[in-house]
Image: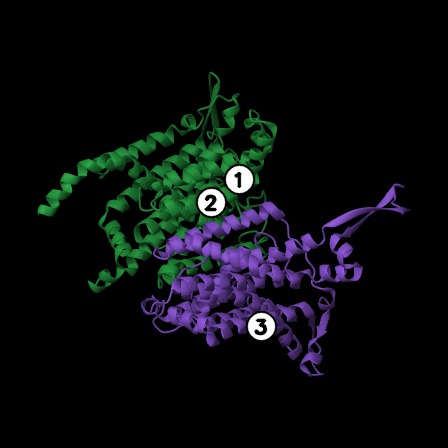
Chain colours: A purple, B green
């Protein structure tokens, strides 16, 4: 393998790893604050993706006008569909809005996911704090099925394509971007955008927890919930908000992932299992652990799916993540960055 | 009888009677009536009842007794299925070698997975088993399904699923033996159809074979529940720390329970293949693992009869709900005014036909939220209302001691 190929695989790993990292970050936040194992987190990722799909469908709702000057192949007057957006804002701006529907969906996804998160926590998860982990797993597993089926009933079972904005759907010369002329690698721009976006979200979450009073209280609550409660702080309310924030992170990860992988109702389940593995590898309850394990496993997976790796061990691409997880759990049960003594049973 | 207490013997006999009479009990509606679609007395479905009953009984030995929630039991079911079909391919269509091998293979498989997974407990255990099952699924679906070791289609034949071809060796296959799964010459598909007035009952060989196997499995599970070993497993669930402090090594007990339940799953997988000689990777998928968890919880984890009950109910609903289509719904609500009827049909349509999984998910949530002890506990609560008064004096005497 030469340098170009290695760089290409690293890039491949980074965009998948970004999705893993974002979902795992949310899972860890929920586990660290509420102590709940949320099997419905993959479903939240999928709901985010379908926010983008719905917005695109909403924007392309069209008015049908009849153009008398032209005829279609049957000789009838031609029916022209123009989206309402174009009628309202003029053709150029309207086209632009539709073209940028995926990034615009972020604005839709944030309130939607906040509401879903709060409703889910107050309506369901709240009652499961004191129940055994098995019950939490089972009830959120049931919820994941229900969310998946509702999406299936409303959007159908097939994958739905929504393209990235036109200027971002080309390829970028990565060598030029890094200022290294001797590297000849081009890579889809949107995937680079996704990575940058993921880093931004992760940065915002970390800064929020590190530098705000709210974040400080939440961190204190994660360390010792009881003492924070004794100080007269309503920690439950803040944890509910953290749950909603975790839902938003998963949703945003889903929105931006749409152009990379067209979503279907099964998307959530596909990502969920791996995200759990990521959380376990990173260390249950450790935020930096979840993020770094997400990228690490993403990159490992992409290297394992090269022909070079497959020739040595056939099928390694299918199992590498699980093998790594098993090895980590057996040799270092608390995960790469887990704190000593936390969930180490 | 058979080393069981009176109560357990009665339970076993009760289950046996219900099972053997199932072809009649499951067909309460005459063939021509409009309610005939609620009949469940046809061979394919009844076989599923008992086979998944075995699966759930086995799962209950692990989850119900030790409290370890495995999310990857479908892997053993799948492994059993593949093993059985391989015996068909190599030796011939007699089902006994296939079923025996499927139990052995799944036992080895469970021993390996259990040995690693049981080094952790709680959610880690669940995630580990889930990871193993997903790994097995991925392997069976892709890698092991490509041509390897000179085998066309590899060990699992990937997406197509493993099946028997004419070119397979089938060493013990004689010309007199039937060309489909059989037990010493009696084909599993043989069905005796009995007409009785407007009713029609189907007595299927495969079903009765599975039923006998299930009763044996059920009997063994009662014995395990009542044995000192079973008591130990319950102790593991109640307080593992205390056991460790008293110097008991709990690991071998949990591992034994894991392997036993894996063997039950393998047996169920083998039977599935024996009824229909085709094994696909989708049997290993984690939704399948989730289904057996649901069966056990719905019926009542840790109870004897619960898992069988749960398996029957889930498989029944799956079959009936997914058969109801828009036309049938419209037929039912004809008596309503048009708009109202349409609205009701529109709503119900989400839950039936292809929307059956929505009903399944909702059931899952409702049972976990409101009835964590399952149907058995629910029934107990219903009957308990009348009994509660009698119990009060008993507790008083205890307090006096």
Q: Mark 2 = which residue?
A: B362
Mark yes or no: residue B281 visible: no
Q: Dot 2: what SS?
A: helix
Quarter of the figure that contains the C terminus of chain A:
bottom left
Subunit under mark 1? B
Q: In the image, which is nearer the foreground, mark 3 or mark 2?
A: 3
**Which residue sits at x=21%, y=64%?**
B245
- Residue drawn at (25%, 62%), measured in percent from left and top? B241
In this image, B249 relative to A125: left or right?
A: left
x and y percent of residue B31 in the render?
51, 22
Q: Give the residue drawn at x 34%, y 71%.
A: A341
Q: Any mark on residue B351, and which?
A: 1
Where residue B361 appears, as percent x and y from the top left, is 48, 46
Marks 1 and 3 close (CB-CB < 8 Å): no
Q: On the picture, is A345 further left or further right than B289? A: left
* Residue furthest to the right: A69
Which chain is indicated by disc 2? B
Q: Does the CB distance between marks 1 and 2 fall below 8 Å?
A: yes
Residue, disc 3 = A200
Callout 2: few (<14), some (14-19), or many (20+) C-alpha neighbours within 10 Å? some
In the foreground, A19 or B318:
A19
Q: Residues within 10 Å of mark 3 (few under 14, many from 20)?
A: few
- The span from disc 1 to disc 3 (Cα, nearest Å) is 41 Å
- State the residue at coordinates (36%, 74%): A340
Q: Quadrant of residue A11?
A: bottom right
Q: Looking at the picture, does residue B73 appear above or below residue A4?
A: above
């Amino acid at each position: 393998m030469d340098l170009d190929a290695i760089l290409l695989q690293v890039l491949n790993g980074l965009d998948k790893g970004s999705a893993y990292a974002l979902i795992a970050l949310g899972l860890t936040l929920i586990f660290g604050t509420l102590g709940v194992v949320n099997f419905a987190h993959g479903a939240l990722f999928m709901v985010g993706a379908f926010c983008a799909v719905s917005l695109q469908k909403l924007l392309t709702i069209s008015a049908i006008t009849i153009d008398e000057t032209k005829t279609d192949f049957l000789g009838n007057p031609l029916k022209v569909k123009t989206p309402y957006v174009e009628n309202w804002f003029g053709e150029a701006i309207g086209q632009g809005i539709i073209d940028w529907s995926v990034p615009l969906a972020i604005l839709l996804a944030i309130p939607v996911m906040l509401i879903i998160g709060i409703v889910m926590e107050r309506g369901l998860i709240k009652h499961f704090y004191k129940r055994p982990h098995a019950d939490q797993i089972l009830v959120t597993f049931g919820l994941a099925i229900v969310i998946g089926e509702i999406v299936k009933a409303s959007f159908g079972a097939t994958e739905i394509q929504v393209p990235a904005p036109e200027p971002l759907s080309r390829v970028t010369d990565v060598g030029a971007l890094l200022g290294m002329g001797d590297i000849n690698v081009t890579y889809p721009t949107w995937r680079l955008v996704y990575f940058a976006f993921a880093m931004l979200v992760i940065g915002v979450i970390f800064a929020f927890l590190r530098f705000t009073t709210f974040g400080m209280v939440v961190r204190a609550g994660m360390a010792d919930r009881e003492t924070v409660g004794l100080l007269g702080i309503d920690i439950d309310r803040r944890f509910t908000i953290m749950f909603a924030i975790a839902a938003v992170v998963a949703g945003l990860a889903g929105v931006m992932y749409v152009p990379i992988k067209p979503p279907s109702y099964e998307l959530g389940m596909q990502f969920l299992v791996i995200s759990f593995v990521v959380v376990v590898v990173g260390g249950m309850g450790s935020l930096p652990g979840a993020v770094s394990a997400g990228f690490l496993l993403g990159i490992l997976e992409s290297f394992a799916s090269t022909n070079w790796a497959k020739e040595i061990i056939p099928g390694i691409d299918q199992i590498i993540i699980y093998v790594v997880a098993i090895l980590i759990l057996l040799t270092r049960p608390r995960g790469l960055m887990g704190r000593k003594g936390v969930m180490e049973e | 009888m058979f080393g069981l207490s009176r109560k357990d013997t009665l339970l076993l006999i009760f289950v046996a009677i219900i099972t053997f009479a199932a072809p009649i009990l499951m067909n309460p509606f005459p063939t021509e009536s409009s309610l005939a679609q609620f009949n469940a007395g046809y061979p394919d479905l009844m076989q599923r009842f008992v086979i998944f009953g075995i699966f759930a009984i086995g799962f209950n030995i692990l989850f119900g007794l030790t409290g370890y929630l495995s999310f990857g039991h479908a892997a053993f079911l799948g492994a059993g299925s593949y093993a059985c079909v391989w015996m068909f391919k190599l030796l011939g269509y007699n089902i006994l070698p296939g079923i025996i091998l499927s139990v052995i293979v799944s036992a080895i498989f469970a021993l390996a997975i259990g040995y690693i997974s049981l080094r952790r407990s709680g959610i880690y255990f669940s995630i580990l088993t889930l990871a193993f099952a997903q790994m097995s699924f991925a392997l069976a679906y892709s890698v092991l399904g490509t041509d390897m070791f000179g085998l066309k289609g590899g060990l699992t034949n990937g997406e197509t699923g493993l099946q028997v071809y004419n070119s397979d060796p089938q060493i013990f296959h004689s010309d007199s033996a039937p060309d489909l799964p059989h037990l010493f010459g009696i084909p599993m598909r043989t069905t005796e159809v009995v007409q009785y007035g407007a009713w029609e009952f189907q007595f299927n060989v495969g079903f009765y074979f599975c039923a006998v196997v299930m009763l044996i499995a059920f009997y063994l599970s009662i014995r395990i529940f009542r044995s000192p070993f079973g008591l130990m497993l319950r102790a593991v669930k109640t307080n593992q720390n205390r056991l460790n402090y008293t110097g008991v090594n709990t690991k071998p007990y949990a591992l034994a329970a894991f392997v036993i339940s894996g063997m039950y799953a393998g047996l169920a997988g083998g039977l599935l293949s024996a009824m229909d000689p085709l094994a696909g990777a989708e049997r290993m998928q984690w939704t399948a693992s989730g289904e057996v968890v649901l069966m056990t919880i719905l019926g009542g984890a840790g109870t004897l009869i619960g898992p069988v009950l749960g398996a029957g109910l889930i498989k029944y609903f799956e079959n009936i709900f997914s058969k109801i289509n828009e036309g049938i719904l419209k037929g039912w609500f004809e008596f309503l005014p048009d708009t109202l009827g349409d609205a009701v049909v529109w709503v119900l349509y989400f839950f039936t036909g292809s929307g059956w999984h929505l009903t399944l998910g909702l059931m899952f949530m409702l049972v976990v939220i409101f009835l964590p002890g399952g149907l058995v506990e629910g029934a107990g609560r219903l009957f308990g209302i009348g009994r509660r008064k009698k119990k009060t004096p008993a507790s008083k005497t205890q307090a006096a001691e």
